[in-house]
């Protein structure tokens, strides 16, 4: 779909898109979502006090999202394959700030060192390098420095499935909040609603020692999406977080 059509499709959003022009285009493709319902008291150890943890029926969630970033580029410039295309894993939770619901990253990994460097420089997001590889039915990563490993073997069903209210709560997020030094940055994003397909997993090996007390056992929910085209805006510095 072309960008003008994406910008006109806003009925699924909880608030209007920003009045100023978008800054970056990117695609989040072939995304595998692993979702855990977690304990609020434990999650608070990982989230800045300036952000309110969002909950559904009183319970917070944390998601591991393994996908392929493609064609990321500034507006009016072409994408550059050595930087623009890479596999990514992010571990995120759900927060509220500035009257909006969004995500907060506990961890972000990318499979290219140069992409990590550029992403950290431009966005101030905490990207770090991990060795990641994927095929049509597997996704694997390894980070030697942190002794972290992820392995998923799966198969995807072609038929799309209707999303539940929980699916929408976990995926339809149009803001990102991140702390950089002593500042909370807000990033607005826009895309069409995530399509969803059924996924069957055969192996899930999630070994991240620093999250051992937060993410326990098998995921409580697993989903897959072929992806979305995403427009993002430059960060906005929040001086005060009312909640």
Image (cartoon, rainbow, N blue to C red):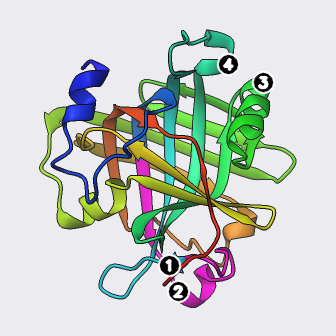
Q: Which of 227 and 3 is in front in this view?
A: 3
Label 3 residue SS: helix
Q: Which tag is nearer the camera, tag 2 or tag 1?
A: 1
Q: Dot 4: what SS?
A: helix
C-alpha span from label 3 to label 1: 32 Å
Q: Tell whether label 1 touches label 2 (CB within 8 Å).
A: yes
Would you say 229 lies left or right of 46 here?
A: left
Residue under circle 3? 114
Whole-number angstrom distance, CA of label 2 to CA of label 3 = 36 Å
The residue carrying mark 2 is: 40
User: How far, Cα to Cα, is label 2 from label 4?
Assistant: 37 Å
Residues tagged 2 and 4 counted as in contact (Cβ below 8 A): no
Residue, disc 1: 53
Q: Quadrant of residue 29?
A: top left
Q: What element carries label 2?
A: helix
Q: Residue 148, image x and y in percent?
A: 74, 52
**Crowd class of label 3 (few under 14; some 14 to 19; many from 20; radius 10 Å):** some
Contact (CB < 8 A) between labels 3 and 4? yes
x 33%, y 43%: residue: 224
Query: Which callout, 2 or 1, points at the residue further toward the start of the chain?
Result: 2
Question: How many other residues sit within 10 Å of disc 2, few (<14), some (14-19) or many (≥20)?
Answer: some
**Of the image marks 2 and 3, the number of the one nearer the N terminus:** 2
Look at mark 4 in the image and give the residue it sits on: 83
Where residue 26 sits: x, y (%)? 47, 27
Graded by Cα atoms within 10 Å as few (under 14), some (14 to 19) or many (20 or more), the crowding at tag 1 reads: many
**Where does the magenta region start and end?**
33-51
């Amino acid at each position: 779909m072309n960008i003008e059509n994406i910008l006109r499709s806003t009925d699924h959003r909880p608030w209007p898109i920003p009045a100023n022009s978008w800054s970056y285009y990117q695609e989040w493709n072939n995304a595998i979502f692993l979702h855990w319902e977690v304990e609020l008291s434990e999650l608070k150890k990982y989230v800045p006090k300036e952000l309110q943890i969002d909950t559904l029926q009183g319970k917070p969630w944390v998601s591991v999202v393994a996908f392929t970033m493609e064609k990321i580029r500034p507006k009016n410039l072409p994408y550059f394959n050595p930087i623009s295309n890479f596999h990514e894993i992010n571990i995120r939770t759900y927060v509220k700030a500035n009257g909006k619901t969004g995500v907060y990253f506990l961890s972000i990994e990318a499979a290219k060192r140069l992409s990590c460097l550029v992403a950290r420089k431009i966005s101030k997001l905490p990207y770090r390098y991990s060795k990641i590889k994927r095929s049509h039915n597997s996704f694997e990563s390894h980070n030697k420095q942190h002794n972290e490993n992820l392995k998923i073997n799966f198969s995807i069903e072609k038929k799309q499935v209707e999303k539940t209210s929980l699916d929408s709560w976990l995926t339809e997020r149009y803001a990102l909040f991140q702390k950089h030094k002593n500042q909370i940055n807000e990033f607005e994003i826009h895309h069409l609603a995530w399509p969803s397909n059924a996924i069957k997993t055969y192996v899930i090996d999630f070994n991240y020692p620093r999250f051992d007390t937060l993410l326990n056992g098998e995921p409580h929910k697993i989903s897959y999406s072929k992806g979305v085209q995403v427009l993002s805006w430059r960060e906005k510095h929040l001086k005060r977080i009312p909640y």
